Image: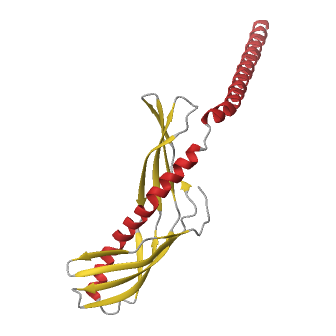
Amino acid sequence: MTYDPNYSLQFPDYSQSAGMFGVYMTNMWVSGLGSFYRVGNMTVSMQNNVVQVGVSVGTDELMGNCHWELSAAGLYSHPGATSFTVEYVQVEAKLNQALDIRKHPVLESLDMTVGNIQLRHEGTGTLDYALELLINLLPNILRYQIVDALEDPLRRRFQDILNTVDVEKIINEEIPKLEKMISQRERDSKQINITKNQETVIEESVDEEELDLNAEM
């Protein structure tokens, strides 16, 4: 899945309270979601006459930014900005393909994992306790926002791609290649057997000549 490598995703504004403190976040965005790469090996199994395929894709490191405002008991507030990096976003998808190859594959499930989030703060001043609160809250908020913003669009995108897959056509195109490969292997195997038989005949001939020489001596 490849799009603009600098594709940026804008998140909706977010607010949350924790005891006497509250945090309000705006202008949240993350860039680097333009490319997903396959991670690890695909898995294939069959159950109830359905072929199940598991595949994982992931991104490189993402970069983002957000503005925030901390408040305490409604008595004061303090604004700031935070840039951050996300180690990766990984998506594990499970696909089902009916044995009726006229049908398209169907996305059964999609799970997302968000890697480690590193923060860089600006504008926190001397609010040490508030900063500690922000550090504890912000990664979880960002992780939730990324999953919430990406999950449904990715589900739709995966299924849109699967709907364009003509399984019957792919199989019909690949069968001749498979038959050709099998035929070539059979020819190679026969050639190896012929070569081995020739080597055996030569060795037996040499042994017989040696026996004749020994008999004459």
Q: Nearer the viewer, residue 13 or 39?
A: 13
Q: Nearer the viewer, residue 74 or 128?
A: 74
Residue at x 53% of width, y 39% of height: 105
Residue 214: where, in percent of width, then height?
75, 10
Q: Nearer the viewer, residue 39 or 140?
A: 140
Residue 71: where, in percent of width, then height?
28, 85
Q: Nearer the viewer, residue 53 or 153?
A: 153
Left or right of residue 51, residue 184 in this image: right
Q: Where 132 falls versus 104 (above or below)?
A: below
Q: Where 41 falls versus 183 (above or below)?
A: below
Residue 125 at least partly seen: yes
Classify the position of the C terminus by image quarter: top right
Question: Image quarter for residue 3?
Answer: bottom right
Left or right of residue 180, residue 127 in this image: left
Left or right of residue 126, residue 212 in this image: right
Residue 39 at least partly seen: no
Question: Image quarter for residue 5?
Answer: bottom right
Colour setup of the view: secondary structure
Residue at x 73% of width, y 23% of height: 187
Residue furthest to the top in view is: 215
Residue 208: where, in percent of width, then height?
75, 10
Q: Where 215 falls versus 123 (above or below)?
A: above
Residue 184: where, in percent of width, then height?
72, 27
Residue at x 61% of width, y 58% of height: 2
Q: Where 71 falls versus 153 (above or below)?
A: below
Q: Give the total of numbered labels.
A: 0
Classify the position of the N terminus by image quarter: bottom right
